Image (cartoon, rainbow, N blue to C red):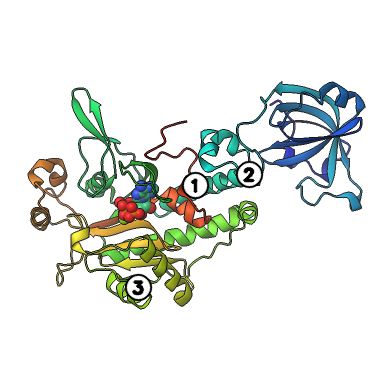
Amino acid sequence: MIRTHACGEVSAKDAGKEVTLCGWVDTLRVTGKISFLLLRDRTGIIQIFLDTGLTEKYQHDLKKESVVLVAGIVHKRPENQVKKELKTGSIEVAAKKLELVSAAETPLPIDVIEDTTTNIDKRLDYRFLDVRREQVKHIFLVRSKIYSKTVEFFEQAGFVAVQTPKLTASGVESGAEEFKIPYFGKTASLAQSPQVYKQMFVVSGLEKVYEIAPIFRAEKSHTTRHLTEFTGIDFEMGFIKDEHDVMQVVEDYFKFLLNEIKKSCKEELQYLGVPVDIPKSIPKMTLGEARKILKEHGKTLPEDEDPDAEAEKLIGDYVKKKYNSDFVFVLDYPWKKRPFYHMRPENNKKITKSFDLLYKGVEIGTGAQREHRLDVLEAQAKEKGIDFKKMSFYRDIFRFGAVPHGGIGLGLDRITQQLLNLPNIREAILLPRDPERLTP
Ligand code: ATP
Ligand code: MG
């Protein structure tokens, strides 16, 4: 390695030692003939003292965001001169040698400072520079942990990780638009859900499967919560009694996830100013009950309609006040609005054994018990006007011994957005894809 220490790792314990550091020029302050360089890498910022000679030689080269290599001696600061705003505030490095590794052009195309005034579109055009900002970096450190802790949870819970095709013939109808692409004289679709395959591999005998993978939706929506490519967290499990078994796993997952994030992302959460509330249990309400609550709050939600963004927000506020919970399961979505493979209760064919999970008033997941009885499934497809014969490989799943099963589709980007209270889902993904954006 070209450095002996990362910038944020040097501490008073290293006083007197020679260290070699390498990072980006955060700021250079020249005072008279000497200067102070704030050098930054992923771990933090450290102050470097440059004497007259080094200042004279380099002051015009050390443009903000250039990469420099510095060798120098660590000095402890006197107690009353500790810089509280820096993690490394108790020390300073007196440079002996300096080397410009890679110069940054000026001017920078975006502000690489915490209080940026650059708009989000421009920031996304230069996302790699934007990520150099502490704020943005912390978001992606947390997202990375959400990803790895999700894997940890499902592995511990005995789920099998699967990777299913993203190039598909055609999805099982889910209401979402598909991206069509040419495929050797045929037309393929980019997977808009791993639904079919999740069910297939529960039935295969793997019993409990999960997948964390891209999902593509050709929805021309311009909202703060929709992307055309996002990361789905999907799981599906067999031998369930009903959809409540699925909800139990979802509840266990979020309790585990939030606990782990709280423990392992202390610094990031503190920097971002985000408290994390862990639910003791996740309250449940039927959509009928939600409708009544909405009515009391002046919002009429017609029968057979899904809650819109405003309704979800109202429900979220209500459960926060009533149960002090950021989460709520909303149950029993109307058959009219749900796909044909959602199971219906025996005594009410107008609803499905489905649920949405709302987190801080935004949907982050939709789950259900699936219909595994072929005759019922065929009848349900017919009722929805779907030609089930054309979906022979989906139909086959239920022909040779299918167990009762259910699952959920969650969105990693939405979870990150809601956990960190980000105003726009584009803040929660490195390189968002939406109807207007295909680059970088
Ligand atoms: P919405 O009603 O918010 O458009 P949906 O009900 O169409 O979402 P589902 O098909 O239920 O979405 O997908 C499961 C989960 O995947 C959602 O709860 C959400 O977390 C995530 N998700 C769905 N569509 C998108 C999208 N376009 N961008 C980002 N995440 C999405
Ligand atoms: Mg949904």
Residue 216 image-quadrant placement: top left
| Res 411 visible | yes
Mark 2: which secondary structure? loop
The residue to which callout 1 is attached is 428
Foreground: disc 3 or disc 1: 3
Sooner in the amino-acid sequence: mark 3 or mark 2:
2
In depth, the one of 434 and 50 nearer the eye is 434
Q: Which amino acid does label 2 sit on?
A: Thr
* Residue found 63% across the figure and 44% down from its top: 116
Q: Mark 3 points at which residue?
A: 294
| Pointer 2 or 1: first along the chain | 2
Q: Position of residue 217 (x, y in %)?
A: 31, 42
CB contact under 8 Å: marks 2 and 1: no
Q: Using the image, tell me which numbered label, if any, was put on residue 133.
A: none
* Marks 3/1: CA–CA distance: 29 Å
Q: Residue 116 carries which label?
A: 2
Q: Position of residue 78 (x, y in %)?
A: 92, 48
Classify mark 1: residues with Cα within 10 Å, few (<14), some (14-19) or many (20+): many
- Res 233 seen here: no
Q: What element carries label 1?
A: helix
Cβ–Cβ below 8 Å for labels 3 and 2?
A: no
Report the residue at 60% width, 43% height from top. Answer: 137
Q: Position of residue 165 (x, y in %)?
A: 29, 36
Distance CA(mark 2)–CA(mark 1) = 17 Å
Instruction: Name the N-terminal-most of marks 3 and 1.
Output: 3
